[in-house]
Amino acid sequence: MLFLTAAVLWLHCAALVRSCGVGFVAHGDSCYHFSHDREAFELAQLVCKQLGASLAEVDSIAEGQYLSSMLAGKSSDHHWIGLSDIREEGTWRWHTTGEVLKPAIAMWDTHEPNNSRPGLENCVVIKTDGKWGDTLCMESHPYICEMPYERIDVG
Ligand SMILES: [Ca+2]
Ligand SMILES: [Ca+2]
């Protein structure tokens, strides 16, 4: 009985401290940081890493819709996510996993990716309308970092 009470208390405490770090918001299995500062793609990735995260990677339609909804109409700038075709022109891969983007998950804007500056538009932003586009990696934009939403156990 004592054990059960202790177990219940522990679970309760653990639930209380389950949170994302400062500056991150929880959604689903992840914590997200929507930056205020603007960086080039590679530097944005580095800043995310310093925060214990990486540029956001979209694993499901629901996650893509969440990120787009967080930006659409609320933001005045495009935001980097961790998607590029730096390795191979025209093959869009997630930065940390190296996995190729599943077409069913993609939320490309009309006419995107258009590689409008041929061979140079290698990095992906979520635009202000919530849709994705490829653009120059050297452009400075705010960015979205993502890390797993893990319970921090106490004691
Ligand atoms: Ca993700
Ligand atoms: Ca483009």
Image (cartoon, rainbow, N blue to C red):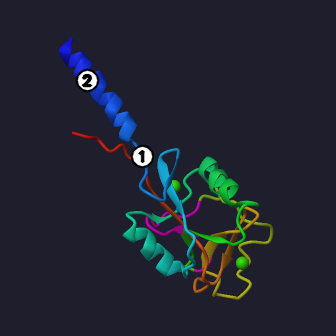
Q: Residue at x 58, y 83 (%)?
A: 137
Dominant SS of magenta comes to loop
Range of residues picked out in magenta: 89-101
Report the residue that reaches farthest toward the right: 110
**In magenta stretch: residue 132:** no
Image quadrant where one finds the N terminus: top left
Mark 2 is on which residue type?
Ala
Image quadrant where one finds the C terminus: top left
Callout 1 touching callout 2 (CB < 8 Å): no
Q: Position of residue 78 (x, y in %)?
A: 67, 72
Above or below, 7 relative to 146? above
Task: Looking at the image, tell me whether mark 1 or mark 2 is earlier in sequence order.
Answer: 2
Label 1, residues with CA under 10 Å away: few <14, some 14-19, many ≥20? some
Q: Position of residue 6 (x, y in %)?
A: 23, 22
Dot 2 beta carbon under 8 Å from ligand 1: no
Q: Residue at x 40, y 66 (%)?
A: 51
Count the marks: 2
Q: Position of residue 75 (x, y in %)?
A: 70, 65
Q: Residue at x 76, y 66 (%)?
A: 109
Q: Residue at x 41, y 55 (%)?
A: 21
The residue that disc 2 covers is 7
Label 2, residues with CA under 10 Å away: few <14, some 14-19, many ≥20? few
The residue that disc 1 covers is 19
* Secondary structure of residue under mark 1: loop
Is residue 10 shown left or right of residue 39? left
**Where, by quadrant of the figure, is residue 127 drawn?**
bottom right
Q: Looking at the image, can residue 128 be seen?
A: yes
Dot 1 beta carbon under 8 Å from ligand 1: no
